[in-house]
Image (cartoon, rainbow, N blue to C red):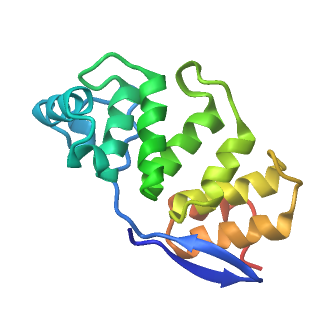
Amino acid sequence: MNKQFININGQNIPVNHQQFRLVLEPNPTVTDYGFSLQYVEELVYAMVMKPDSDAMRDPENLNNLGIIFENGLGVERNMDLAIAMYERAIIFDDDLARSNLADIYRKGTNGVPVNLPKAFSLYLSCGLPYAHYRVGEFFEKGWAVPQDLNQAKTYYRMAYLEGHHLAQKRLQTWNFLQ
């Protein structure tokens, strides 16, 4: 993993510049994620028939299985399997899986109950710029944590300096750089 830690105001904050494909389509397809149907079939086969294989110890594959089951890409949507695959990828310290699972709990995706404390914990341990933005949002709005505008500024600033588009947009309505 590419994760490192930086110390800001006595806090060790994870930082990870792992690349990923952002998909904003409301009904994404296999190809929106850069997958082929053959890749999906091979991953699902490995999950069912070869659960102890190297493929099922690869955090990228596990995260991708989470995406596949969360979105019903070439398979029937199954949130229990999606969550299980994300959790398994997190065991291997995969920040994309952390962020994907946090999003499920923040939004209550596909019938999964909203769980803001769990979402916050996942974002907080994730080093992606997107997660830094979300931690700032939690602190700003007091979701699952006491409202703390100084902490919100810290995390928004990090996301902004990392080039995250939501932090750049947020700066238009709140100057958290001062």
Residue occupying the far front of the picture? 52
Q: How many marks?
A: 0
- Which residue occupies the foreground of this view, 97 or 168? 97
At 80% from the left and 45% from the top, the residue drawn is 143
The residue at 37%/42% (across/down) is 23
Asked if one can make out residue 154 in the rendered structure from this viewpoint, the answer is yes
State the image coordinates of residue 167 (x, y, percent, origin top left): 60, 62
Q: Is residue 139 above or below residue 78?
A: below
Q: Which residue is found at the position 42% from the left and 20% from the top?
A: 78
**Which residue is the extreme one toward the top?**
76
Dividing the image into 4 quarters, which one contains the N terminus? bottom left
Picture quadrant of residue 123:
bottom right
Residue 113 x/y as whole percent: 66, 24
Residue drawn at x 81%, y 50% is 141
Say left or right for 97 vs 50: right
Locate residue 12 relative to residue 60 in the image: left or right.
Answer: right
Give whichever of 127, 51 is nearer the camera.
51
Quadrant of the image containing the C terminus: bottom right
